Image (cartoon, rainbow, N blue to C red):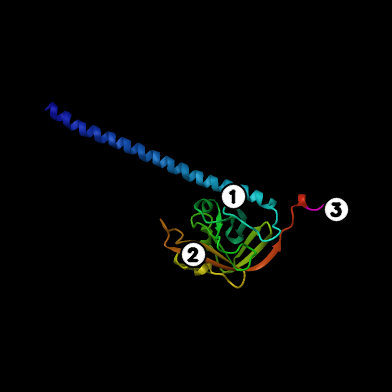
Amino acid sequence: MNARVSIERKPRKAGARLARVASYFFLAAGIWGLGYATYVVVDAQTYQATEEMRLPNMPPAEGPRMVAEGDVIGEMSIPRLELKTIVVQGESSKILRRAIGHVPETPLPGEPGNVALAGHRDSYFRPLRNIQPGDVITIKTADAEFEYLVESTEVVLPSDVQVLQPTVENSLTLVTCFPFYYVGPAPKRFIVHARQIGQSREQPPIDEAPLRD
């Protein structure tokens, strides 16, 4: 009788120990996940704030601007959607975690053709779900400020790269994943088409303006 009780207790103790180890594992994983998510948010906010302060002090280019991956190009805003974010050269996961990226194969703002910007649907480009024809998009760089008017939106497959093809007039294409609330890798892409309607040259900062007698 006592031997049977002892044998029954051993599996129960082993099961309780396994359950306790599993609970510690999932607790640690949950804490790590929460910590990483917090780090991602804080890192992105810090990066945006830092680059926004640096942007007014970027010197204008004397000729065609040369940019490398990771270089800040400027700041994009859509006033009606209260969207404002730094634009960075490249599409790496680190860049898109902190800002929106300029597709390298496309022109820079101010150059002829179709400027393409990409962003995550669950961060800086989430407001695009409410974008409408007639909305104004502004891109401010060290060289000038460019205004674009939204003309249309569409949903395409990831393989449809036709949306990035060059255009005769100066235009802007925004790309993000779709559907916006899809769980996991989204199967489609949401595209915003806009055309340039204005450009103004940037003035030098007050402390760099030429002195007069």
> Type of residue at label 1?
Gln
Q: Which residue is mark 2?
A: 190
Residue 91 percent location from the top left of the image:
52, 56
For marks 2 and 1, give the CA distance.
24 Å
Residue 90 percent location from the top left of the image:
55, 56
Q: Mark 2: which secondary structure?
A: strand
Q: Residues within 10 Å of mark 1 (few under 14, many from 20)?
A: some
Tag in front: 3 or 1: 3
Q: Is residue 182 left or right of residue 151?
A: left
Q: Earlier in the sequence, mark 3 or mark 2?
A: 2
- As drawn, which residue projects farthest toward the bottom? 168
**Mark number, residue 212:** 3
Q: Give 81 or 202, whichever is nearer the viewer.
A: 202
Q: Earlier in the sequence, mark 3 or mark 1?
A: 1
Q: Which residue is mark 1?
A: 48
Q: Mark 3: which secondary structure?
A: loop
Dividing the picture into quadrants, the one containing residue 133 is bottom right
Q: Mark 1: which secondary structure?
A: helix
> Type of residue at label 2?
Phe
- As drawn, which residue projects farthest toward the top? 2
Q: Earlier in the sequence, mark 2 or mark 1?
A: 1
Tell me which secondary structure the magenta stretch mostly adopts: loop
For marks 3 and 1, give the CA distance.
36 Å
Q: Residue at x 66, y 52 (%)?
A: 55
Q: Residue at x 58, y 46 (%)?
A: 46
> Type of residue at label 3?
Arg
Specify the segment rendered in magenta: 209-213
Q: Give 167 or 186, whichever is nearer the viewer.
A: 167
Tag in front: 3 or 2: 3
For marks 3 and 2, give the CA distance.
51 Å
